[in-house]
Image (tube, grey):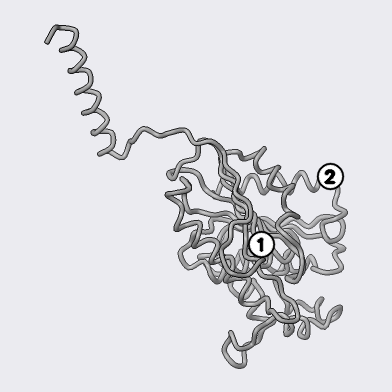
Amino acid sequence: MNKLNLIFHIFIFLFAFHSCSDSDDGNEIQIFLEAETHLNISYGSHPHQVYDLYLPAGRSSSHTKLILLIHGGGWTGGDKNDMNGTVAILQSLHPEYAIANVNYILADANQYAFPYQFQDLRTIIEKISSESQELNIKPEFGMIGVIAGGHLAMMYDYKYDIENKVKFVTSIVGPTDFNDSFYNENFEIPIIIQLLVDPEAYPEGTDFLTELSPITHVSNSSSPTAMFFGDQDPLVPASNGSNMQEKLNQFDVNNTLKIYNGGHGDNWTYEDVMEMQSIISQYIQTYL
């Protein structure tokens, strides 16, 4: 073996030894992954049980976390496509995060909303968590919900997130307390809730107005929560926000409450919307 070949073989040996050492220390050489979009991923047999998954470029199972988007629609309507604009904004402002934009089974004459919509969120989170190594993401989640989606996000975090995979919740005009006097004065809320609930899925005698109110389930383990309301909202009163903030403060849960001049989020000023967007970004950067 000539001198040049000897040097070459020594170099190969040292490189192989160094690579093995890096692997043993958990410092494997990472392959740069391109961004991927997967639409209408099924997580159940119902046509509504699908979600879109946006995986960022350069993702890694050590640091790439996920933002879960939950659309509104009164638990009976709406679609994940309603949140496509939010997906684009998040990809622009927070390109290092994965995003799941989800559908859930909607209530109708033959299908109850509760508790099945909560269970749909749990199934999605469990599915993504079980595939996290394959997807090259870290199974930690932040939730952004709008109206009914805000209610679902808070309920899931406060009651169903036993493993503490959810790190923050942001709710845009999501109902927090169905016992609020506003509902008794303006809606037949007991009748509405009764139509949405499968009574056989809960213990006999359950008070559903209380059980389905996120404010009921706040605890020390609740995640940081940002809430946004309108002071002239005809559907979800601003008092839902102030009452919830008081409850969160009782348990020392970090929270932000903004009450804007206007209605159901559709007539807030540009400045208000930009402030809301900035607060949500702060929650993503701080807690996720």
Instruction: Give x and y (percent) for residue 221.
Output: 51, 65
**Decide: marks 2, 1 in contact (CB < 8 A)?**
no
Closer to viewer: mark 2 or mark 1: 1
- In the rendered image, the residue lying farthest to the bottom is 204
- In the rendered image, the residue lying farthest to the left is 1
In the picture shown, does residue 2 fall above or below 188? above
- In the rendered image, the residue lying farthest to the top is 3
Q: Find disc 2 in the rendering and name its residue.
A: 270
Q: Amino acid at mark 2?
A: Tyr
Instruction: Give x and y (percent) for residue 199.
Output: 64, 87
Instruction: Give x and y (percent) for residue 168.
Output: 58, 56
In the picture shown, does residue 32 fall above or below 80? above
In the picture shown, does residue 284 fall above or below 200? above
Frontmost residue, 145 versus 186 = 145
- In the rendered image, the residue lying farthest to the front is 1
Instruction: Give x and y (percent) for residue 78.
Output: 76, 63
Q: Amino acid at mark 1?
A: Asn
Q: Find disc 1 in the rendering and name its residue.
A: 103
Is 19 left or right of 213, judged from the image as shown? left
Q: Residues within 10 Å of mark 1 (few under 14, many from 20)?
A: many
- Residue at (44% x, 49% y) in the render: 134
Is 60 left or right of 214, judged from the image as shown? left
The quadrant the N terminus occupies is top left
Q: Decide if residue 252 is in sight here.
A: no
How many numbered tags mark residues here? Answer: 2
- Residue at (50% x, 44% y) in the render: 64
Location of residue 147 by image quarter = bottom right
Element assignment for label 1: loop
Q: Decide if residue 219 is in sight here.
A: yes
Q: Residues within 10 Å of mark 2 (few under 14, many from 20)?
A: few
Q: CA distance from mark 2 to mark 1?
A: 28 Å
